[in-house]
Image: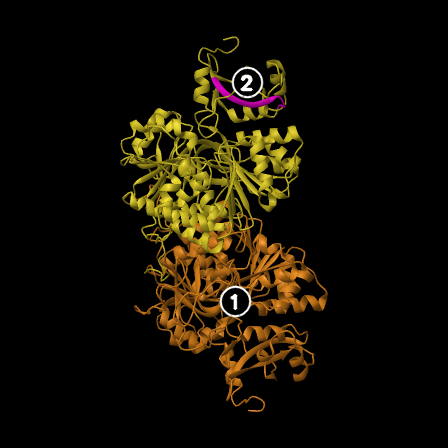
Chain colours: A orange, B yellow
Amino acid sequence: MLGQMQNHPLLISSLIEHAERHHGDGEIVSRRVEGDIHRTNWVTVAKRARQIANALDAEKLAPNERVATLAWNGYRHLELYFGVSGSQRVLHTLNPRLHPQQLAWIINHAEDSVVCFDTTFTPLIAAVHSKCPTVKRWVALCDADKLPADSGIPNLVSYEAWLGAQSSTYSWPVFDENTASSLCYTSGTTGNPKGVLYSHRSSLLHAYAVVFPDSLNLSARDAILPVVPMFHVNAWGLPYAAAVAGCKLVFPGPAMDGKSIYELIEGEQVSMAAGVPTVWQMLLGHMQAGGLKFSSLKGTVIGGSACPPAMLTTFQDTYGVEVLHAWGMTEMSPLGTVCTLKNKQLALDEAGRLKVRLKQGRAVCGVDMKIVDGAGKELPWDGRTYGDLLVRGPWIIDQYFKAEGASPLVDGWFPTGDVATIDADGFMQITDRSKDVIKSGGEWISSIDVENVAMAHPAVAMAACVGMPHPKWDERPIVVVALKPGAELSREELLAFYEGKIAKWQTPDDVVFVPAIPLGATGKMMKVSLREQLKGYTLPGV
Amino acid sequence: MLGQMQNHPLLISSLIEHAERHHGDGEIVSRRVEGDIHRTNWVTVAKRARQIANALDAEKLAPNERVATLAWNGYRHLELYFGVSGSQRVLHTLNPRLHPQQLAWIINHAEDSVVCFDTTFTPLIAAVHSKCPTVKRWVALCDADKLPADSGIPNLVSYEAWLGAQSSTYSWPVFDENTASSLCYTSGTTGNPKGVLYSHRSSLLHAYAVVFPDSLNLSARDAILPVVPMFHVNAWGLPYAAAVAGCKLVFPGPAMDGKSIYELIEGEQVSMAAGVPTVWQMLLGHMQAGGLKFSSLKGTVIGGSACPPAMLTTFQDTYGVEVLHAWGMTEMSPLGTVCTLKNKQLALDEAGRLKVRLKQGRAVCGVDMKIVDGAGKELPWDGRTYGDLLVRGPWIIDQYFKAEGASPLVDGWFPTGDVATIDADGFMQITDRSKDVIKSGGEWISSIDVENVAMAHPAVAMAACVGMPHPKWDERPIVVVALKPGAELSREELLAFYEGKIAKWQTPDDVVFVPAIPLGATGKMMKVSLREQLKGYTLPGV
């Protein structure tokens, strides 16, 4: 027997309609590629999203055809989020940090019909367009008079001319909420990239979960700054969540340096910002150098990589900004856990609270998680036992795009590739990536623990720990370090800095200084590249 | 093309599993029928919910069979919420304030198979059981040794013996999320009561919306006190929302007097309480008499009836408690709007903010609303134009239980029976119930406006405004007043109190003093009964 409530599918179009109707004058502020600040609102975004839908109809795009974006965070990208998915096409966000060859591979694999790109990327598109036979329309995200001249890109039109020709009257279609809404490829450190195909249902349920008080806690009083890119996992779902809650949105465009981000936060009175540690490192560097303070920022959400303890305490103690440690993956839409404390943790002393805050946090309602041993047996939640972390839930991947039946799942659970502990209160802590763990003499050493100690040293800008082959112990850790500009530090000084902070047998055997740690397309440290750079290296005394 | 995310139906069982796993030691505190305070937690509630599922299996109840409750707010009722719906039976909450004849009618209409009742209601069950042929099992919510003796109720068992005999091992079934989960009859002022049949999907989506920061803003740090009864619209969805957020739950049992509620709030450090104005009137009366203060309460949610301005300002100014005005209906699960302010309203002066706070508020994301004129034409959102309020959304009724195709909807929208304005920022304000509006000389007078002035008088405990036939004006308002114990007030003094507070032509023509205003089963004023009491009354000079 079915309930007798109304049947309204969970569609992305319903979010833009809600935002337009209930938060019409809510601001969307963007720093553009040109460097200027652009202001619009939800009414205008909704109107232009309908024009996009009409433009896609004019291109004769069938439902489910892919419309790709190669763009920074900005209002035009936001309009495409709603216009493309709302009209039952699939928004495919391309990562501009990829190699042109990989980009072409992804466009072909996704069979994109239209590609919309920021003019920053005109050279990239000029380099790949001839290898992309499925693309019938290239759209440059600019005014008609800014259209790149002599680019050689065929069927090229400016975004403003393309949508400007269209009516803003459009009725969003109603269809099955399980329909594909958007596509994002994982930047895959090995093998070809793999596409994660989100649905309208998964996107809306995820957006609700993002809004929760124990997640990002978003209300109509918030101004949020997604520094985390819209080209990667839908900027953690923030464009959708902002429409749910009626937030003001502030977009940084391509300028993610500390000065630009700081000016946006202050100028637009941002209350909540979301990004990866490397971006915050730059922001804190700028603020420390200039003796600056925040006047509106209440919280930052830090994810993508584990947050170094030094960064967390600096944000909290020096700037009074609450740091929410979060964890997720492209395959998880991405939100899995957020580290919001319960009353009993709030009652701990400062050191006790910090210990909890450094964990990745509690599962958001909707996400189920467990840790298992090598045989798949579930392990206890005691905060000490570690095992492979598995997850499941309505916004977690079932299978990759075009995987043709091959499933990454294990008994219905998605293996995250992370090794973690979970404590009795449900706080999960990533010990390491399964592939980054250093196996030394039958024991595991967390590369993250080793990195965190180095990162806490005032001279260190970034640190990466990798395992090196050792005849007796199988592997021993070394730490690869990039120093802050002008800072000096010797191998011996850094190794001495480990004393008392980590067990002797976990302390790295060596320090290697490099000008910079290689970062991947999403700002994460690329240990695969690092290991390649270290080819020929041998441990001291080996 | 469908997205490729995991298929997990939204089931009520997933909520109790989440609460057990992530908030196992979270407390559930109940004042029992016996008067004592009982303490349990989510682990134990989950365990006993599984025992209930096994007990229902032992009774050979098929999926979809109805299990009724006639019970106060308490842990056993909570266990039934999850055990009954989780095992794919339908939880039918009966309203103990109904007349026995109406109660029997509802049990028969719903075809309840099992009825679980608090022992307070043993006389009521003794009076109706013989008229309820579908009921094969009566369960008294008590220990085995407290089972009512010589009640004459057949197939009677104590709850503790009934579930105590069962294993706590049980795998929750997985089924279509649109399956019926629970049933609640509207107390219908005219005609037979009508059943609203909620689904698992509607209950979960509604619970998510309740948790939102701009709704009730519930986190794992909250202790919530649902004074609003679990026998009516699932206590506004709070039992489910508490499981989503991992809140502490505090249940008042049958003791809803000011003293008992105050003691619970203080003793259990309640942060958020939810109830109808009449309950808060009693609480404030108790506090004023004793010169008491709150030490933990941050907010109250007031719904069910419009909140009198005097109550709102007393809560805010005297006790520092934020009042959230909310609005909904049984047919809406019930949440429709909550009055949380945006930054621009917060920037108003005190009087300006109060004016907004007195509105019923903004639509929760998921609820769509509009106002229409008599011809069904949509009216502007200008804060002045009023019209019939219509709503739609995934937790709003499609049709009543056993309505056999007859739909209450108008073009897919549910007519609420309320008359309202909506302002440009989406704040809705109920002007009146369509049927309570007083039509005087072609103009409408809001009965609520007239009542609010009287309620602001210190001598008035409760006031109801009704229209009386008038030869010239069609109708004229009178106000029916119950005074506070020991208070004195004359007709002329009260009429003089209206001066300057309301337009002359909206001022009531007469005052009628009564010992008490008749209240319905859910604590709302029963104007139908009041009009019956006033039979034979004529307006002065008519």
Residue A139 shows in the view = no
Which range of residues does the magenta coloring cover?
B457-467
Read off the chain for label 1.
A
Give the residue at x 30% y 44%: A2
Q: Residues within 10 Å of mark 2 (few under 14, many from 20)?
A: many
Read off the chain for label 2.
B
Asked if both marks, 1 and 2, belong to the same chain, the answer given is: no
Residue B37 percent location from the top left of the image: 52, 39
Q: Secondary structure at mark 1?
A: loop
Q: Secondary structure at mark 2?
A: loop
Q: Which residue is mark 1?
A: A384
Q: Give the quarter of the image for residue B490.
A: top right
Q: Which residue is mark 2?
A: B508
* Left or right: where A396 falls relative to A315: left
Foreground residue, A129 or B7? B7
* Left or right: where A225 falls relative to A171: right
Q: How many tags in the picture?
A: 2
